[in-house]
């Protein structure tokens, strides 16, 4: 019998399966795409399960979703420490040695990135309504994610952070925007994000551009170039400045519908 291909991550699944074993996306629901080309990220059903290496992940709840992991021995994930919801007593924790702690703290990012090691159970969530977005990463992939958006990443994923200079962001006084960077080398990995509100994805062609409110930006492939543009609108004698993130393809761009608006007066 023919295997079922997941429309979200393109993994192959056994016939009769209703959700993807790799990312949890429903296999019995069609893609929802707007006329402009934005595709809704798959809404993972309550209690959906998928596999992470030898471990099992389960998504619980819908308004403020929780990702619960049954970690097998030898498996592990890393995360911003404040997203930990609960863990079994035997689930070991440690700190990820990623450097740049002071610089991260000054940028408003977590000083510590923590790790959980199997065997044992552990659960994660963010204190905001939204959606869980599961991004399987094939070897040689690189994804940039806005700060405070990732829930967990597997140990096969390399982690760093970058500053996008010139991207006006009122949270940092117009000095730039920081992003988490996730890279896979010879092994596949898994990245799980939390998007505020609803999450949408669009694939840009080579040279194709789109302007995005900086607060709405969620993730992008590293092949997508990000710059800032300012557009001014006059109302009588008052000038309003609007900063937008200019995305240039090729590659995927993900946005979230619930965000803090960034502007200049």
Image: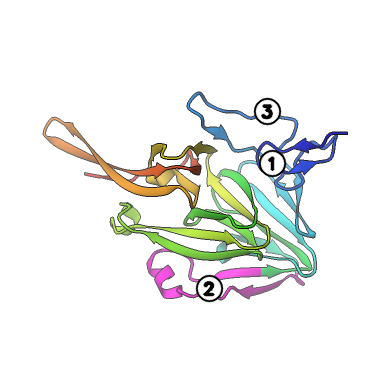
In the image, residue 130 above or below residue 137: above
Check the image and report above or below for 250 versus 83.
Answer: above
Circle nearer the viewer, 1 or 2: 1
Q: What whole-number distance in Å separates the C-alpha atoms at marks 1 and 3?
A: 14 Å
Instruction: Rate crowding at label 3 as few (under 14), some (14 to 19) or many (20 or more) other CA atoms within 10 Å.
Output: few
Tell me the SS state at disc 3.
Answer: loop
Q: Is residue 8 left or right of residue 232?
A: right
Per the image, is 222 magenta?
no
**Disc 1 or 3, which lies upstream in sequence?**
1
Write the residue at 48% across / 66% down: 110
> At which x and y percent is residue 161?
47, 64
Q: Give the range drawn in magenta.
A: 89-115
SS for dot 1: loop
Residue at numbered disc 3: 30
Callout 1–callout 3 Cβ contact below 8 Å = no
Among the 4 quarters of the image, the one containing residue 78: bottom right
**Mark pair 2, 3: CA separation:** 40 Å
Residue at 61% in and 41% down: 63
């Amino acid at each position: 019998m023919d295997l079922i291909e997941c429309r979200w991550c393109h993994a192959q699944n056994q016939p009769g399966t209703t959700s993807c074993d790799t990312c949890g996306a429903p296999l019995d629901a069609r893609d929802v795409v707007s006329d402009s080309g934005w595709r809704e990220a798959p809404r993972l059903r309550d209690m959906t399960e998928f596999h992470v290496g030898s471990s099992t992940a389960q998504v619980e709840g819908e308004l403020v979703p929780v990702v619960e992991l049954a970690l097998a021995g030898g498996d592990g994930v890393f995360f911003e420490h404040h997203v930990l919801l609960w863990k079994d007593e035997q689930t070991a924790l440690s700190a990820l040695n990623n450097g740049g702690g002071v610089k991260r703290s000054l940028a408003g990012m977590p000083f510590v990135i923590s790790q959980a090691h199997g065997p044992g159970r552990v659960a994660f969530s963010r204190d905001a309504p939204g959606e869980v977005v599961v991004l399987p990463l094939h070897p040689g992939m690189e994804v940039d994610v806005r700060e405070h958006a990732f829930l967990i990443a597997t140990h096969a994923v390399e982690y760093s952070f970058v500053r996008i200079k010139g991207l006006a962001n009122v949270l940092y006084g117009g000095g730039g925007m920081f992003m988490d960077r996730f890279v896979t080398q010879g092994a596949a990995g898994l990245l799980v994000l939390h998007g505020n509100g609803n999450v949408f994805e669009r694939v840009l062609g080579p040279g194709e551009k789109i302007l995005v409110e900086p607060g709405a930006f969620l993730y992008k492939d590293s092949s997508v170039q990000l710059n800032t543009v300012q557009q001014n609108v006059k109302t009588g004698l008052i000038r309003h400045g609007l900063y937008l993130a200019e995305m240039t393809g090729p590659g995927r761009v993900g946005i979230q519908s619930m965000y803090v608006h960034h502007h200049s007066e």
